[in-house]
Amino acid sequence: MKLSCKEASRLMSEGQDRDLAFGQRAALRLHLMICTACSRVKTQFAFLHRAAGEYPGPEPDDGPPKS
Ligand SMILES: [Zn+2]
């Protein structure tokens, strides 16, 4: 199975929401190895996903330091 860039980006987008089938993951990984444009897109997807999903929130307030 050989992916076009369009199919690869669709799989990357779907992969953000749910797990891909084994065959889809394998085909996508193969495409990313040979296609620099899509591997760059994947990096951006991963960054956006992290930024959206893991906002750390404010620092916990432990009160003033004891002296
Ligand atoms: Zn591509």
Image (tube, rainbow, N blue to C red):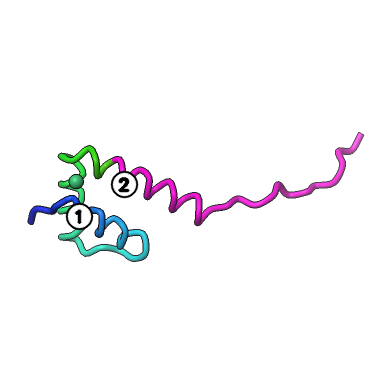
| Quadrant where the image shows the C terminus | top right
Bin the neighbour count of mark 1 within 10 Å (Cα to Cα): few under 14, some 14-19, many 20 and up: few
Residue that extends furthest to the front in the rendered view of this protein: 6
* Residue 24, position as x, y percentages in the image: 18, 59
Residues under numbered marks 2 and 1 in contact, where contact means CB atoms less than 8 Å apart: no
What secondary structure is found at the residue carrying circle 1? helix
Q: Is residue 52 above or below residue 66?
A: below
**Amino acid type for the residue under numbered disc 2:** Lys
* Residue 38, position as x, y percentages in the image: 24, 44
**Amino acid type for the residue under numbered disc 1:** Lys
* Residue 44, position as x, y percentages in the image: 38, 45
Residue 6's disc is: 1
Residue at left 43%, top 46%?
47
Residue at left 13%, top 53%?
3
Left or right: residue 64 compared with residue 50: right
What secondary structure is found at the residue carrying circle 2? helix
Q: Which residue is mark 2?
A: 42
Mark toward the viewer: 2 or 1 = 1
Q: Is residue 50 above or below residue 40?
A: below
Viewer-closest of 63 and 14: 14
Residue at left 31%, top 45%?
41
| Quadrant where the image shows the N terminus | bottom left
Q: Is residue 14 above or below residue 35?
A: below
Residue at left 21%, top 44%?
32
In the image, the segment drawn in magenta is: 40-67
Viewer-closest of 5 and 43: 5
